[in-house]
Image (tube, rainbow, N blue to C red):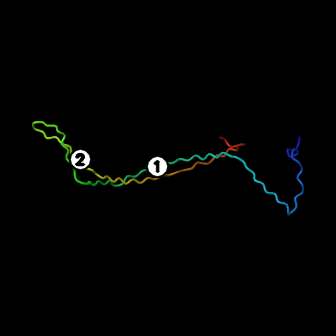
Amino acid sequence: MKNSFEQYPPVPECGMDSECKKLAKHYINIDIPVDVRSKADVGRIETECCGEPMVICTGEKKADTCHFVLVQKVCIRIPVEYKLAAKAEPSMVECCDKPEK
């Protein structure tokens, strides 16, 4: 059985003043499942009239009825508090030769 390092040339002896800097790279895929749950709490709803109401006559006439439309702008304040909870499951690592495209 051959040694797997026999295919590489021999390495010369390194002295103290020799410099050897290398950068090794390896690609891996990491999967981390995450669950996010949301909750919304609605606070006290408040309303407020804005300006004066308007009366719009529709033009419909009947002997015993007067028909019109009352229009009022209203401001509605709805306080909502959102809460999120995230939980990460254990990760999984898969080694690969090159990055996937």
Q: Tell whether 58 sits left or right of 45.
A: left
Quarter of the image that includes the N terminus: top right
Alpha-carbon span between mark 2 and mark 1: 37 Å
Query: Which residue is disc 2 drawn over?
Result: 71
Q: Nearer the viewer, mark 2 or mark 1?
A: 2
Residue pictured at 88% horizontal, 61% vertical = 15
Residue 47 is tagged as none
Decide which of 15, 56 is in the foreground and name it.
56
* Residue furthest top as drawn: 62
Residue pictured at 18% horizontal, 42% vertical = 57
Q: Are marks 2 and 1 in contact (CB under 8 Å)?
A: no
Q: Tell whether 4 sits left or right of 54.
A: right
Amino acid at circle 2: Val
Query: Which residue is disc 1 drawn over?
Result: 38
Decide which of 84, 11 is in the foreground and name it.
11
Quarter of the image that includes the C terminus: top right
Image position, residue 70 (x, y; %): 21, 46
Q: Secondary structure at mark 2?
A: strand
Of mark 2 and mark 1, the one earlier in the sequence is 1
Residue pictured at 70% horizontal, 46% vertical = 27
